Amino acid sequence: MPLHTTGVSLQGQNLGALRFGYDVMVGNGLGSGELLDNNSFKSLTVAVHVKPRDGWRMGASLYHDVISKGSVLHNHSGGISTRALAKINQNILTASFAYNDSVFTKKYELLAESSMALNKADSLGRQNTIASYAYAGIRLTDKIIPYIRVDDIQYRQEEVYFSDRNVQSFTGGVRYELNYLAVVKLEYQRIKSHRATAVDRVSFQIAVGF
């Protein structure tokens, strides 16, 4: 889903025994840029979640947008922009699950999410793209958390919006928490793509939050 949208939103949190929450937003959508909006279509985001127990969170969301022909889209990694060759009706459905064994110890960490993007153009019909990931970590000490993550993205060959580049990856690493705002990570990742040979890499990262 788009990370940055200009619009109006409504939100509710921790309602009732299940601690129900919701977010509803009407925004400019993907056809707009930082300064201009090239069409009258607006995007709609609806997200809901429940937290039935401490450490549990289950959610689902829907994103709907209409992308006008000729729109410049910032939808790929590496700063690549593409231009929509046809009018595209886009719906993105997402389901997610998060679990920590306790709000105090947080020894076990489980995350899973799957999204299905349905992109429809008059010339090629509707194409489905499915992206999923699963993460598991265990806190060995107050500071050290080893973890693994698997990612999978499957595109249709006739995809009208995303690049046709099926990707699977496996990641294993160790996270060291300096404090509640800063972490250090060392991880190994293997990436497989049907358009390129498999890639193995080791990375070191320092992440700081604000």
Image (cartoon, helix red, strand yellow):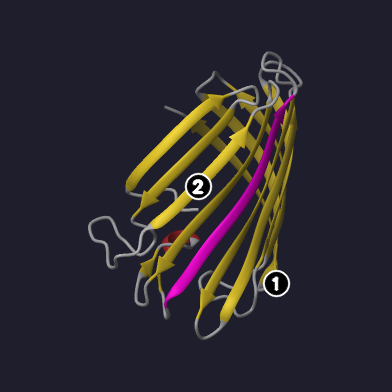
- The prevailing secondary structure element of the residues shown in magenta is strand
Q: Name the residue under label 2.
A: 46
| Residue 32 located left or right of residue 95 | left
Determine which of the numbered discs, if any, sits on residue 110 in the image: none
Q: Which residue is at 71% across, 40% downward?
A: 135
Please give the residue where the numbered disc 1 appears in the rendered image: 194
Q: Which of 24 and 182 is in front in this view?
A: 24
Q: Of residues 203 and 178, which is closer to you in this image? A: 178
Please identify the residue farthest to the front as the structure is shown: 16
Q: Position of residue 36 (x, y in %)?
A: 23, 61
Q: Is 201 located above or below residue 160 in the figure?
A: above
198 and 94: which is toward the camera:
94
What is the x, y in percent for residue 89? 48, 70
- What element does badge 2 sit on? strand
Quarter location, residue 14 = top right
Using the rendered image of the protein, determine whether residue 208 is visible from the camera's viewpoint: no
Above or below: residue 70 compared with residue 129? below
Q: Quadrant of residue 108?
A: top right
Dot 1 or dot 2: first in sequence order is 2
Pointer 1: residues within 10 angstroms few (<14), some, or many (20+)?
A: few
Q: Residues within 10 Å of mark 2 (few under 14, many from 20)?
A: some
Q: What residue type is labelled 2?
A: Val
Which amino acid type is marked by label 1? His
Span colored in magenta: 87-100
